Image (tube, rainbow, N blue to C red):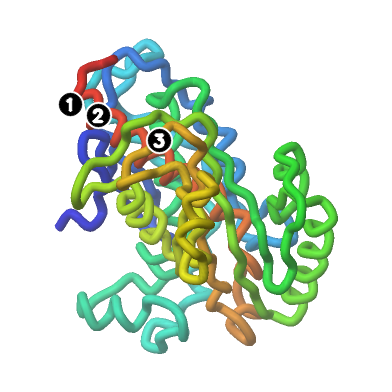
Amino acid sequence: MASNSFGELLRITTFGESHGPALGVVIDGVPAGVALAVEDFLPELARRRPGQSAATTARRESDAPTLVSGVFEGRTTGMPITVTVANEDARSGDYAALKDAPRPGHADATYASKYGHRDHRGGGRSSGRETVARVIAGVVARKLLPAETRIVAHATRIGPIVAQTFDAAVIERNALRCADPVAAKAMEELVATLKAEHDSTGGLVEIRVEQPPRDLGDPVFAKLKGKLAEALLSIGAVTGFSYGAGFRTAEMRGSAYVAEPANFGGMLGGISTGEPLRMEVAIKPASTVGAAAKAGRHDPCVVPRVIPVLEAMVALVLADRLLVQRSLRGAS
């Protein structure tokens, strides 16, 4: 089955379970000669890593990557790139009681029904731990994009608290990765309260792509908006996707819609215009709450750790569609 693979010309296959020996990714389609080293993965893996702050799970993982194949003397060879990350702090015993007791809001029941046999430890493949492979692949994808293309995601809402300002410089300076320092403080206080109550909350995240390549996306079933939606909705925590004016278009007049180019979200006809791309996704509250949260190690809010995953998936889509476009029009 191909459900563990994503992409057309830049194709990734992720593997591994939350409590297995390791997780990893095979990245195929990367041209030869791209500079790549283990050190390139470390900053993004650090952003996704558990145990970063009081707003995330207490599980401790170094997420040290091992570059297995596809690179020689610091450059890609054109062959499949394989990178693995070992699991070091899994506590499988925490899940023993859940083997035959599906958790509400998780994939336990559906995996058991579909496959008849499942790895119940931490959710297996349905765990958010799977996203470490996506972040690794996103690092490689960014290397294929123009140097001026910048992908930035930030929390615009955590529970009832909504960001009012945007300062990119403060995103990595607070635990919730919010671009509004005042809202960020209130968000941190809310999450701390929920953690003490063994509860959780969701949020909204905006993804901005500055200076994206133009002409990405193809009619009719390979529109860029569709590829982005597929990529982002494949993340377990994501429950909604919109771009540009999003659901506000339902109440707009056409004259108002066309008067503001930002309403288009950087795409027309499903093809990128070269203007900034704007997307927003909804992130669900962590489903492990109450006694289950008290017994284990869980995120009271997954928003800050999902942000680098969102950025990685956007990078993968853009890099893949850029390779497709080059195949249509040549390297120019």
Q: How many marks?
A: 3
Contact between labelled residues 1 and 2, with CB atoms less than 8 Å apart: yes
Q: Is residue 211 visible?
A: yes
Residue 130 in the image, given as x and y percentages of width and height: 41, 55
Rendered-image quadrant of the N terminus: bottom left
| Residue at (48, 76) in percent of width and height | 95
Q: Which mark is residue 125?
A: none
In-front residue for pair 117/279: 279
Q: Secondary structure at mark 2?
A: helix
**Residue at the farthest left position:** 1
Q: Residues within 10 Å of mark 2 (few under 14, many from 20)?
A: some
Is 92 located above or below residue 35 in the figure? below
Rendered-image quadrant of the C terminus: top left
In-front residue for pair 226/268: 268
Instruction: Please name the amino acid that badge 2 sits on.
Output: Gln
Ranked by sequence position, the earlier of labels 1 and 3 is 3
In the picture of the structure, the residue carrying the numbered disc 2 is 325
Is 68 located above or below residue 299 in the figure? above
Q: Which mark is residue 328?
A: 1
How far apart are the two marked residues, 2 and 1, measured between alpha carbons? 5 Å
Q: Secondary structure at mark 3?
A: loop
Q: Residues within 10 Å of mark 1 (few under 14, many from 20)?
A: few
How far apart are the two marked residues, 1 and 3, measured between alpha carbons? 17 Å
Instruction: Please name the amino acid that badge 3 sits on.
Output: Thr
In the picture of the structure, the residue carrying the numbered disc 3 is 273
